[in-house]
Amino acid sequence: MAKYRKFNFKWLRLLFIIILCVGIAFRVTNIDKKVYWHDEAYTSLRIAGYTMKDFSQGAYAHRDSSIKYLQTFQRFKPGSQLKDTIHSLAIEDSQHPPLYYVLLRFWVKLFGNSITIIRSLSILFSFLVFLCLYWLCLELFQSSLIAWMAIALLAVSPVHVLFAQEARQYALWTVTILGSSAALLRAIRLNQTRIWIVYAFALATSFYTFFLSGLVAVGHGVYVFIIEKIRLSKRAIAYLLSSGLSLLLFTPWILSLIQNYSMFQMTTGWTNNALPADIFSLRWLLNIGHVFFDLGLEKDPEFLIVYFLILLLIVYAFYFTIRHAPLRIWLFIITLMAATTLPLLIPDIIKGGQRSIVPRYLFPGYLSIQLAVAYLLSQKISQSRLLSRRIWQAIATLLILAGIISCTLSSHANTWWIKEISYSNPQVASFLNKANNPLIVSTNGCINNGNLLSLSYLLEPKVRLRLVDIAPLKEIPQNSGDIFIYGDCTEPVRDSLIKNKYKIEPILPYLWQLKPGKGN
């Protein structure tokens, strides 16, 4: 890395600082404008001290509900305590350990319950990402140029900016991935007890943030034992003791997960649903490309060539890093990527599923990509050959501009692909708010309930709700204005409506209008 001491990049540092400021601006822009979607509504439900069972027993017992009543489940439950939030997660959603939700509960208690306040905690965590990334790059590369390049790439990375504005734990998870990784590299380098203890607590913090941190820990273990040539050296023993301590600290939640494993399987079972090979491949390509470029669902298919070019650049970055970087550098990047991606990808290929195309599961892989690309660009823009240097400076500039353009578009939108099953909720709400004395009929279900809570932030008070615990639907009021069914219109629901001589007209995703007729 000595060449970087000879390379004068003061002007580059200034440029990187400007890019960082632009990235910070994107993170704080219009944070209350995007739809507060299904998963975020569940975040508010958990921190409020409610369970989904509470919601079902309350909302569906009333049958005829109001938007105002749904919103009570997004505010603190009277008399609820911190243990209620932890209990709600433990028994119903143990894939989400409690650290983020505990911190958010305190945050909301202090500052209020608005969407801006709730999402602002994730934004603060996203600022810590820059510090942890800089530390990791210094430990890994011993180069401030590469560190600043990585920060610039991440600052305007579309996927990082999007998740920085989510009322979910993924910005905090990114902090813990980077922090625990940097602590590991420092512990290996210095081999001091206190640093190994720091690593143990950093890893435990990551465990308590997201369950896939276990794969990050596996990557760390593989890295340590290969570096130590598969010997029980002092460093390897120190690593085992530190990892053991972190697992010991996480034991209470492991026991909770085991106790509620059937619920864990149910809440993650959708990832086992196979997709057609062409859609699966396309999602993989887009997920990788979204690290640098993202124009949204409508425009993505028009720019597939751009995504292929980005994929080629990423492949070359890994190749270049393996060829030119020391073993301890490229091995860390590869193990972080492989250990967290292959356990998701291989079952998808063999048994079918979509684990490996869920963007929020892929943050360790995203970070590996950015580290490899940052190393490639830093090496190339500092080499002596003028023409080659200019070409790679242009490539780096294009990557940054692609991120800035992408973030500019998404920051002014009221929905984006990240909102998944709630993507169309702004359109749905706008349509319902304009309808004549609208009545929404919905049945009990996880997706329906989360989306109903999401819609409650957008609908006007005039919209009425008829919530039915089970299909078939009965007793739909007559002459009550426009009647709609919202949610997953399953076969039992459809059959009961046809039996009662209703026509079902699709309006928008998850929204159908009911009209008297002979049925479909």
Image: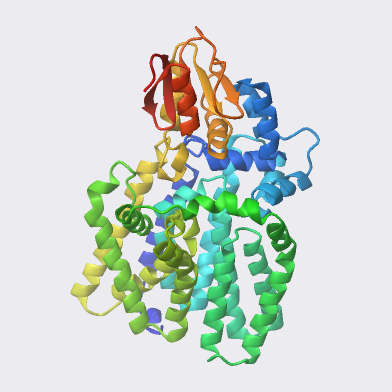
Rendering coords of residue 215 (x, y %): 55, 68
Please name the residue shown 44% across and 57% down the image.
353
Rendering coords of residue 478 (x, y %): 51, 9
Rendering coords of residue 78 (x, y %): 78, 32
| View extreme (front): residue | 499
Please name the residue shown 53% across and 92% down the image.
229
Locate residue 213 relative to residue 487 in the image: left or right. Answer: right
Q: Toward which corner of the image does residue 52 lie, by quadrant?
A: top right
Frontmost residue, 191 versus 249: 249
Q: Toward which corner of the image does residue 342 lie, by quadrant?
A: bottom left
| View extreme (top): residue | 479
Frontmost residue, 173 versus 141: 173
Please name the residue shown 25% across and 56% down the image.
306
Frontmost residue, 401 versus 174: 174
Rendering coords of residue 520 (x, y %): 36, 23
In the picture shown, does residue 423 fall above or below 511?
below
Locate residue 340 relative to residue 401 in the image: left or right. Answer: right
| View extreme (right): residue | 79
Question: From this viewpoint, is residue 416 visible?
Answer: yes
Q: Toward which corner of the image does residue 88 lie, by quadrant?
A: top right
Question: From this viewpoint, is residue 94 visible?
Answer: no
* Display colour scheme: rainbow
Image quarter (top left, top right, bottom left or bottom right) of the N terminus: bottom left
Give the tally of numbered discs: 0
Please name the residue shown 67% across and 66% down the image.
204
